[in-house]
Image: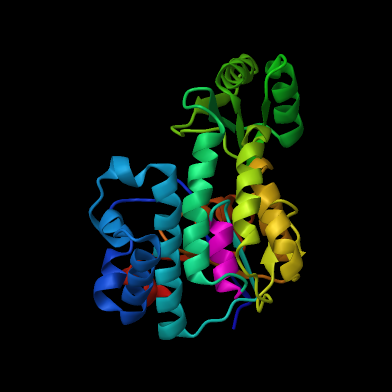
Amino acid sequence: MKQTAFVFPGQGAQAVGMGKELYEHFKQAREVFEEANDTLRFSISKLCFEGPEETLKLTENTQPAVLTASIAALRVLQSEKGIEPKLTAGHSLGEYSALVASGGLSFPEAVQTVRLRGRFMQEAVPVGEGTMAAVLGMDPEEVEKICEEAAEGEVLSPANFNCPGQIVIAGHTKAVERGIELVKKKGKKAMLLQVSAPFHSPLMKPAGVRLSETLDGITVQSLRVPVVTNVEAQVNTSSDRVKPLLVEQVSSPVRWEESMRRMIKEGIERILEIGPGKVLSGLMKRIDSKVGTANLDDIESLKKIV
């Protein structure tokens, strides 16, 4: 059996209809959606399956919705295929799904926490004052230099190191726009992202303070499966470090490419992307195409996993 890691998507993977097929065909998926509905005291299942898209795209809805769809898919995979991962990881919000998969967080506490996390992140910066942009075809050092040059006393920094040639920057809107112009002057591509806040930038520190207070009220169990964390791109086996790393994660860059390279160093030969979309599988192909990838978000994709 190939050494397998489970990875979980973050915000941006959401789509109306996600999880519906698994919900209709598998008791395990139904139970997860029902647990989420009970915990959140509204029908997140209806929002996932029927939309409207505008409501699903609101950060405080997106985060629990993607987490719920991901854990529903995980439970189906576990019951149907019995595959156990050697490591887990998740992109931003997906790190909470990874912690549920690893046994560190209970699903009800995770879904409640990410709903609040979404609200805190949205409220940290007034709408319109901060944004993000994707920079293509530049290396991390070049992007960091551009951020320093374009900041002009405002906040601008790398937010996601996704894969070779794809880095996201975040900060004050005007600083991001200046950064885009500098990238274009160098003959490279950069584009504004349709996001409502400058996630994973220092502007998110107020959200981290509020998140810390929320995390104080939950229990982290021991990690049955180690988690490769966004903040450090290292393997974490200590339940004591989970909360501080989740707080830091809100205002720190997601070091996804390094995280995946860490997994490869640990002997991972296959990545299973569990939950909506195929974004992380696509990134892995660009990080190291020798690593096998598969995703699970419906019955067709479940059949292909062995």
Q: Is residue 187 above or below residue 171?
A: above
Number of residue marks: 0
Image location of residue 268, percent across then percent down: 66, 70
Q: Is residue 173 visible?
A: yes
* Residue 6 visible in image: no
- Quarter-wise, where is residue 105 in the image? bottom right
In the displayed structure, does residue 55 sit left or right of residue 199? left
**149 sits left or right of 190 in the view:** right
Asked if residue 100 is among those painted magenta in the image, a careful observer would answer: yes
Q: Which residue is located at x 72 percent, y 71 percent?
A: 267
Residue 236: x %, y % from top left: 74, 66
In the image, 209 versus 21, the foreground residue is: 209
Q: Quadrant of residue 234?
A: bottom right
Residue 103, located in which quarter of the rendered image? bottom right
> Which residue occupies 37% across, 43% down?
57
Q: Quadrant of the N terminus?
A: bottom right
Which percent across, then down, holds residue 52? 25, 45
Main SS of residues in magenta: helix
**Magenta stretch: includes residue 240:** no
Q: Is residue 56 left or right of residue 284?
A: left
Is the image coloured rainbow, by chain, by secondary structure, or in one colour?
Answer: rainbow
Q: Nearer the viewer, residue 164 or 47?
A: 47
- The magenta span reads 94-103
- The residue depicted at 49 percent of the width and 46 percent of the height is 118
Q: Residue at x 60, y 78 (%)?
A: 2
Left or right, 44 with reference to 132:
left
In the rendered view, tell whether residue 46 sits above or below residue 139: below
Rendered location of residue 162, percent (x, y): 61, 45
